[in-house]
Amino acid sequence: MKLKRQMTLSVLTAIALTVFLIEANLPTFVPIPGVKLGLANCITLITMVILGRRDGAIVFLLRVVLGSIFAGQIVSFLYSLVGGAVCYLVMCLLLKPLGIKQLWAVSVFGALGHNAGQLLVAVLLTNPGILWYAPVLLVSAILTGAFTGIAAQAVVTKLPEKKREQ
């Protein structure tokens, strides 16, 4: 890995982790468990566009592991890991066909995948009765995914064309 690429990846990981930790310590704006903005996903999306999907996975994995350790949320590690992995896979599948101009849509579908992954973990760890929560998560995924996707799209479209991997 070239030094410049490695430094960029390190900075993006640090930014994603910092955003994650700040968001984890903010009071919740919605009194519904599990609903949060997910601003750190903006950094994952930006990384996927400028450095590629593999480096996006590195940022995602380091953010989840280190974020769980630093925030003291080891219990939620499994939820974050599974939800984030599904989100990442969905975004990987949609990034190329939808492209940078539709990054907000990639983010919405990623957020839907994230919530589906977390719901799967909740069903496996608790009981299927938790599925009543799915409509609430559906609405929150659309709203938060659109917001974070628009933010990531705004950053990416300001980058010079040669900085984008696609």
Image (cartoon, helix red, strand yellow):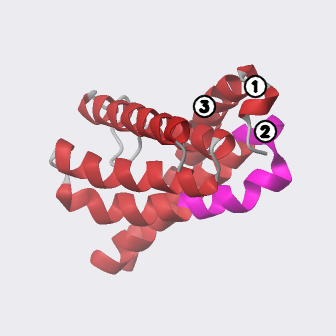
For the residues marked 3 and 2, what is the alpha-carbon distance in whole angstroms? 15 Å
**Above or below — where is 62 with respect to 6?**
below
Residue 73 drawn at (x, y percent): 19, 51
Q: Locate residue 78: give its quadrant.
A: bottom left
Task: Tell me if label 2 and label 1 are in contact, CB under 8 Å.
Answer: yes
Residue type, label 2: Ile
Residue type, label 1: Thr
Residue type, label 3: Phe
Per the rendered image, the range of residues in magenta is 87-104
Q: Is residue 99 left or right of residue 146?
A: right
Depth check, front residue: 79 or 31: 79
Q: Main secondary structure of the magenta part?
A: helix
Query: Which numbered dot is residue 131?
Result: none
Assess whether residue 118 is covered by the magenta stretch: no
Residue 22 drawn at (x, y percent): 30, 28
Tell me the residue that label 3 is attached to: 147
Depth check, front residue: 88 or 147: 88
Query: Which numbered dot is residue 100?
Result: 2
**Above or below — where is 13 with respect to 81?**
above
Which residue occupies the extreme front position in the image? 2
**Image quarter hosting the C terminus:** top right
Q: Secondary structure at mark 3?
A: helix
Tell me the residue that label 1 is attached to: 157
For the residues marked 1 and 3, what is the alpha-carbon distance in whole angstroms? 15 Å
